[in-house]
Image: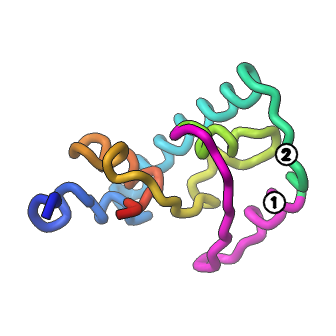
Amino acid sequence: SRRRGSGMRKMEWAGRPNHIGGIPRRIVFMAVGAFAKAVASLFNSTSVQNADTLIRLVRSRPPGIPLITVSNHMSTLDDPVMWGFKGFPSMDAKLARWVLAAEDICFKNALLSYFFRLGMESDAD
């Protein structure tokens, strides 16, 4: 097995909403959300179809109810950046959803594992 110990590489505990009062998760979402908004608005031209419907569904989703989104993207930055479009609450950790991430990129060491768990990433392996 490539995993060390009980949750050392996986760090499931960092993905819990109450980990250190939720402060690290809010910091990660604010930083990544600000980055996504900057990239989406300053360096790209973004066109989102039915954005109002998506925003309404994200904002009105009851706790514990999943919202499945599917995207076809070309790079590892596409997923976080595409949520930076105007009006999307990308910096609000309370509205976040879990996403799949490549283990060989996002969970290859303790620091990356911690960061990506805070960002609600789950390893796809």
Q: Residue furthest top?
A: 42
Query: Which residue is under mark 2?
Result: 48
Which percent across, then down, holds residue 103? Answer: 34, 53
40 or 114, which lies in front? 40
Magenta stretch, residue numbers: 53-76
Q: Is residue 25 magenta?
A: no
88 or 25, which lies in front? 88
Which percent across, then down, holds residue 28? Answer: 47, 42
Residue type at mark 1: give it: Leu
- The majority secondary structure of the magenta stretch comes to loop
> Could you tell which of marks 1 and 2 lies nearer the N-terminus?
2
Query: Which residue is under mark 1?
Result: 54
**Which residue is at a point 31% across and 42% down the rendered structure image?**
112
Question: Please, is residue 41 above or below residue 76 in the view?
Answer: above
Q: Is residue 108 left or right of residue 19?
A: left
Q: CA distance from mark 1 to mark 2?
A: 10 Å
